[in-house]
Image: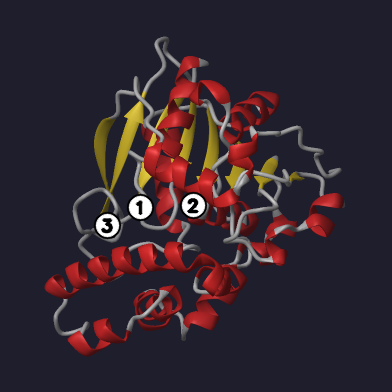
Amino acid sequence: MPIIESNYRPPFIFRQADIATIYSAKVRKVEGVEQKRERLDLEDGDFVDLDWSLSEQKSDTCILLLHGLEGAADRAYIRGTAKLFNQNGIDACAMNFRSCSGEMNRSFGCYHSGKTDDVLEVLNHITQDKAYKNVIIKGVSLGGNVALKLAGDNVGIPSALKAVIAVSTPCDLAGASDKIIGPRNFVYGKNFHVHLRKKIKAKQELFPERISDKMIKSIKNLRDFDELYTSRAHGYKDADDYYEQCSSLNVLENIKVPTLILNAKNDSFLSEKSYPYEIAKNHKYVYLETPKYGGHVAFWQPGNVYYNEERALEFALEHL
């Protein structure tokens, strides 16, 4: 598909990536969304919590929303999408990845950028148990990579999946890790580090024999976390192996469902490889839109409906 020429032009103040990113993450609020929680028990004995919000009329269409690293279903970027889709007659299921719903999950592992099996179980729950005929997936940041990896692996995907939207997505995990731990993103990297240390300490309480105080102290950044915990807890040799096997960039060519990747050019988390122009240019199903502005999950627009949410709805409606 041809590369999409973006018409996103925010006001001057939101053209600055850090202002847009921090405002959207810390200041933005989305009211008027009633989310009801459902716990889904998984085949391996663990669980995920799903936060549902429904349109006013009965719908046969659902959007499955996947959050980013150490996010949750109550974040503004999730609630904003849910609200807009609900207003347009589409139900929303916001998935909290394992350990992200306010209660630690049961197993030693939790979630990561390539963990698609939990999403597939949720998809089957939506299409079989809930009987939705049409499903859209929208993933943001880490959740975007999970969504693209699921579509690219193309194993067991229900025919009800009609479209995938990936926003601010690190298709190249190694490159994104290097960006996040670099000096340009020191503040963001430090914030992730604080959250991940809390996560690993909570894991230690459940599995003291597998996580030592020495290990926790040695985690200084995101890459250390992936080297010492993420990779080992989920069957990868090390961080490099995890990044290589789980980067959606490696499977984009295999996607066979209409897919939109929306990555801002001024997103400081993304490496050059996360803008797959050559793949999208010659692909039947993958559309790539790279606005000049947008920061990381920060496509501000007047009226508190963000550009990425508006584009997700447009793309979904085009392919239902």
Residue at image coords 64%, 42%:
15
Check disc 3 and give the amino acid type.
Answer: Ser
Residue at image coords 70%, 52%:
265
Q: Of label 2 and label 1, which has the lower sequence position?
A: 1
Check disc 2 and give the amino acid type.
Answer: Gly
User: Which percent across, then down, holds residue 233?
Assistant: 34, 76
Q: Which mark is residue 143?
A: 2
Residue at image coords 76%, 32%:
7
User: Which percent across, then down, holds residue 238?
Assistant: 46, 85
Picture layout, residue 135 above or below residue 40: above
Q: Is residue 233 left or right of residue 271?
A: left
| Quarter where residue 250 is shown | bottom right
Tag 1 residue = 97
| Quarter where residue 190 is shown | bottom left
Q: Is residue 306 left or right of residue 37?
A: right
Q: Residues within 10 Å of mark 2 (few under 14, many from 20)?
A: many
The answer to whether mark 2 and mark 1 are in CB contact below 8 A is yes
Tag 3 residue = 99
User: Which percent across, then down, holds residue 148?
Assistant: 60, 53
Q: Residues within 10 Å of mark 3 (few under 14, many from 20)?
A: many
